[in-house]
Amino acid sequence: MNASVHDDRPCLLGEGALWHPLRRQFFWFDILGRRLMSRDHAGPLEWRLDRMASAAGWIDRDRLLVATETGLAILDLTRGGALEDLAPVEAGDAATRSNDGRADRQGGFWFGTMGKRAEPGAGALYRWYRGQVRRLFQGIGIPNAISFAPDGRTAFFADTAVARVWRQPLDAQGWPQGPRQPYLDLAGQGLAPDGAVIDADGGFCCACWGEGAVIRFAPDGRQTHRFTVGGKHSTCPAFGAAGQMLVTTAREGIAAPDPAQGLTYLVAHDLRAIPEPAVLL
């Protein structure tokens, strides 16, 4: 599978890849650059933000629910980069910021927080659902790989700092039901799980920091596919239309980045994608 450059504007920390099915556009964030980015038929698009933001879910054609360093906000794509605060989360803690996030099958939105210096155990996982935010887990170093089984009854998430991925059973409304279960321990393979998305066959497609690739794992943990990109620090995939996957990358942590680092890539794939669900307010 070959990768091509989707967008040649380098990101310090590209993240939060999202396909908007109504607009038929990819969106992604440069967390450290405080911007939301996209492209349409006319060329590159950019929204400058007043704070760090990292992940989003689509509400309708013009609005996104955005995870930021002070909590959840709504961004109207037709009104520049102005963020309308919705729910504060760790807003009084200047040492933390948001990280990975994704909408679940029930219309909720999961997102993580972490220390700005990746302090051990400083992060947590939260869920927005129908007007409320609830903290689900704490003591996480770098929360990542938030993704959901096709039937919506299992959530997946990782702590990149310890290279582990867990499965969490969910009830019919998408809340955790019972204890989380180990799924992948990637430390022995030298892999650092970052953002992830799950295909229609239950394949866990995970960007791996430092690997320049999205690796697909079967439900039983076997590696089945490897999609390579030009950027070393691959951070987050998103399925789009017509057999395409967007993969963000980062320049952060690379002393002398070459021109391939931090770009956003398109990868052709032969997987069965699942449409990105809307977030319910």
Image (cartoon, rainbow, N blue to C red):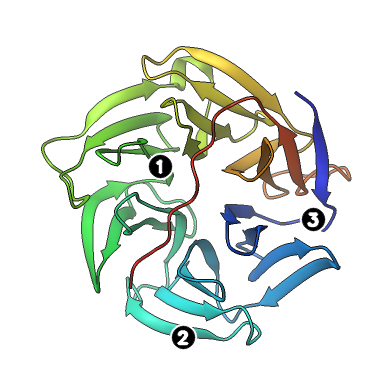
Image coordinates of residue 46 in percent, x first then y, are: 73, 72
Q: Amino acid at mark 3?
A: Pro
Label 1: few (<14), some (14–19) or many (≥20) C-alpha neighbours in 10 Å: many
For this view, does 255 lie left or right of residue 227? Answer: right
Number of numbered markers: 3
Residue 57 lies, with reference to residue 100, above or below; the image says below
- Name which residue lies at 64% across and 83% down: 78
Quarter placement of the C terminus: bottom left
User: Counting residues from the N terminus, which is met first, the one under dot 1 or under dot 2?
Assistant: 2
Badge 3 density bin: few <14, some 14–19, many ≥20, Cα 10 Å:
some
Q: Residue at x 37, y 36 (%)?
A: 150
Circle 2 is placed at which residue position?
84
Amino acid identity at mark 1: Ser
Check contact, mark 3 vs mark 1: CB within 8 A.
no
Q: Which residue is mark 1?
A: 147
Question: Which residue, as the protein is rendered here, is positioned at the far left?
Answer: 178
Amino acid type, mark 2: Glu
Local SS, label 3: loop
Residue 68: tell me if it is visible: no
3D distance between C-alphas at marks 3 and 2: 27 Å
Q: Which residue is mark 3?
A: 10
> Horizontal and vertical percent for residue 73?
44, 77
Which secondary structure, mark 1? strand
